[in-house]
Image (spheres, rainbow, N blue to C red):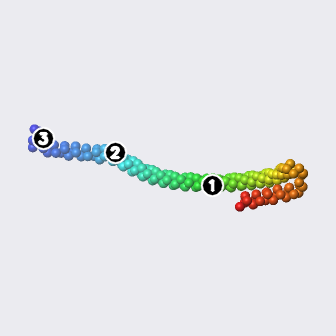
């Protein structure tokens, strides 16, 4: 093997050093700067992506917070509107109930007045009819017509006696 022959050992070491030096210079001047640039660009892009991700995360958190705030405000506003509507409907219902009660009271009063008037008229007719009937009975029994004042007084006394018994 020629590599292990002592006679060729020194020239091989010299050529090794020359080749190593040449390769080192080529690597140091050409390849390593390109690799360094690629790594530097990669690190810058990673740092840029991380800062963008951090910025986007903060924006997302801010958007989420504003969403939560808007949602809470919307719920509060909806609750307020619902409460106002309930209050307004309760007031309107109370007003309508009061109007209805007033109309019913008016109608009841009018009906009671009509009934009282009809009762008074009926009682007046009853007194007249009772007086006419009593006069006719007495005239038929006695043959002479009684005095209308006496018959009216007797009918009035009987009606008052009847009224006092109804009250008691």
What residue lies at 20% left-to-right and 46% top-to-bottom?
17
Mark 3 and mark 1 in contact? Answer it, CB < 8 Å: no
As helix, strand or loop, the secondary structure at mark 2 comes to helix
Q: Is residue 111 visible?
A: yes
Mark 2 and mark 3 in contact? Answer it, CB < 8 Å: no
Which of these two is toward me, 12 or 144? 144
Name the mark on residue 17.
none
As measured in the structure, the alpha-carbon distance from the residue carrying label 3 to the one carrying label 1 is 111 Å
Q: Is residue 83 left or right of residue 127?
A: left
The residue carrying mark 2 is 34
Q: Residue furthest top?
A: 1
- Locate the C terminus by quadrant: bottom right
For marks 3 and 1, the one nearer the N-term is 3
The residue carrying mark 1 is 90
What residue lies at 75% left-to-right and 54% top-to-bottom?
112
As helix, strand or loop, the secondary structure at mark 3 comes to loop
Q: Position of residue 105 (x, y in %)?
A: 72, 55
Q: Is residue 70 left or right of residue 26?
A: right
The residue carrying mark 3 is 3
As measured in the structure, the alpha-carbon distance from the residue carrying label 2 to the one carrying label 3 is 35 Å
Q: Residues within 10 Å of mark 2 (few under 14, many from 20)?
A: few
As measured in the structure, the alpha-carbon distance from the residue carrying label 1 to the one carrying label 2 is 82 Å
Q: Position of residue 32 (x, y in %)?
A: 31, 46
Q: Residues within 10 Å of mark 1 (few under 14, many from 20)?
A: few
What residue lies at 34% left-to-right and 47% top-to-bottom?
39
Q: Is residue 121 visible?
A: no
Q: Residue furthest front?
A: 142
Mark 1 and mark 2 in contact? Answer it, CB < 8 Å: no
- Locate the N terminus by quadrant: top left
């Amino acid at each position: 093997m020629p590599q292990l022959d002592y006679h060729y050992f020194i020239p091989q070491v010299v050529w090794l050093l020359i080749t190593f030096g040449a390769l080192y210079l080529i690597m140091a001047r050409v390849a390593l700067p390109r690799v360094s640039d690629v790594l530097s660009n990669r690190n810058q892009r990673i740092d840029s992506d991380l800062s963008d991700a951090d910025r986007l995360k903060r924006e997302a958190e801010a958007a989420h917070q504003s969403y939560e705030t808007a949602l809470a405000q919307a719920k509060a506003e909806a609750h307020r509107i619902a409460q106002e509507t309930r209050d307004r409907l309760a007031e309107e219902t109370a007003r309508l109930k009061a109007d209805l009660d007033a109309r019913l009271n008016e109608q009841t009063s009018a009906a009671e007045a009509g009934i009282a008037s009809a009762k008074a008229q009926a009682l007046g007719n009853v007194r007249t009819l009772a007086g006419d009937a009593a006069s006719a009975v007495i005239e038929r029994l006695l043959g002479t017509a009684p005095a209308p004042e006496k018959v009216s007084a007797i009918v009035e006394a009987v009606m008052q006696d009847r009224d006092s018994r109804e009250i008691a």
